[in-house]
Image (cartoon, helix red, strand yellow):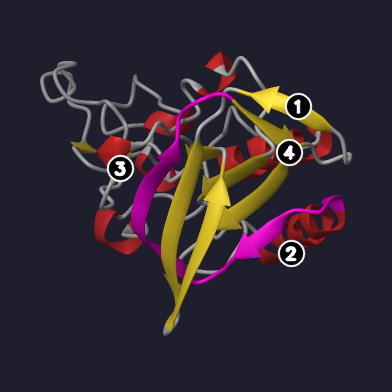
Amino acid sequence: MPQFDGINSVPYYTSDNIFNLTQQPNRMLIIGAGPIGCELGQAFQRLGTQVTFMTRSGLVLPRDDRKAADFLAKQLHEDGCEFASQSVIDRLSLISNKPRVSESKNGGYQITSNPEILVNYSQGSAQKELVVDAVLFCTGRTPNVENMGLKEAGVEYDPEDGIIVSDQYQTANKDIFAVGDCIAARFSNKKKDCQMYPGKGPSFTHNSDV
């Protein structure tokens, strides 16, 4: 989890607990615009939440095919999603954690128990702020590949990036194959250093490219 000033003072969500929400937020900030962030962001936007994506790079699906990613970005804009591109969070602050009457997206009013969170962020040299009801972190996953006996099994891996595979998803042990979020190609840009397959492995959260 990225460490921001004030992160321990506000409630936040990840893809692991976002479905624990008991009330739909009116405004949601999503940190990151990878497969999981785009998938969840589009769903919440279409359900009526005003979604804002915040990214450092300004790109949607930065590791995927640009033509496909640009097509998705266009669709997200058409859905009404907003973007704070090339932005970095400076501080998260809890405004209120008490039930309150809020205006819904359709113009009505409702009692909400979701917190109000102030997000201070930098966009270039500009200092900006955003008030939301939910913050969702979709900044990527770290593969859990240690303490599994991979070294003893002859499987090469990087503790931070995952299991190293060939273009056939074969590990250094020819009898063992690996796919999905555990393989290094999904987590690292250091493909040349690792001498690994330069593409993406099968993904289980969006359409894969195999």
User: Which residue is labeled 3 in the image?
Assistant: 7
User: Which residue is labeled 4 in the image?
Assistant: 49
Q: Is residue 163 visible?
A: no
Do labels 1 and 4 touch, CB within 8 Å?
A: no
User: Is label 3 in a helix, a strand or a loop?
Assistant: helix
Q: Tell me the chief SS of the magenta region.
A: strand
What is the quadrant of residue 43 in the picture?
top right
Looking at the rendered structure, the kind of residue marked 4 is Thr
- For the magenta stretch, what is the residue range? 79-99
Looking at the rendered structure, the kind of residue marked 1 is Gln
Question: Looking at the image, is 61 positioned above or below residue 14?
Answer: below
User: Is label 4 in a helix, a strand or a loop?
Assistant: loop
Residue in view at x 86 percent, y 34 percent: 108
Q: Is residue 90 magenta?
A: yes
Q: What is the C-alpha distance between the residues marked 3 and 2?
A: 31 Å
User: Which residue is labeled 2 in the image?
Assistant: 70
Do labels 4 and 3 touch, CB within 8 Å?
A: no
Q: What is the C-alpha distance between the residues marked 1 and 4?
A: 14 Å
Quadrant of the image containing the N terminus: top left
What's the mark number on residue 29? none
Towards the viewer: 110 or 197? 110
Quadrant of the image containing the C terminus: top right
Do labels 3 and 2 touch, CB within 8 Å?
A: no
- Work out whether mark 1 precedes mark 4 in sequence or the reverse, and give the earlier one: 4
Towards the viewer: 42 or 122? 122
**Left or right: 155, with 14 as reference point:** left
**Left or right: 22, with 42 as reference point:** left
- Work out whether mark 2 precedes mark 4 in sequence or the reverse, and give the earlier one: 4
- Work out whether mark 4 precedes mark 3 in sequence or the reverse, and give the earlier one: 3
User: Is label 1 in a helix, a strand or a loop?
Assistant: strand
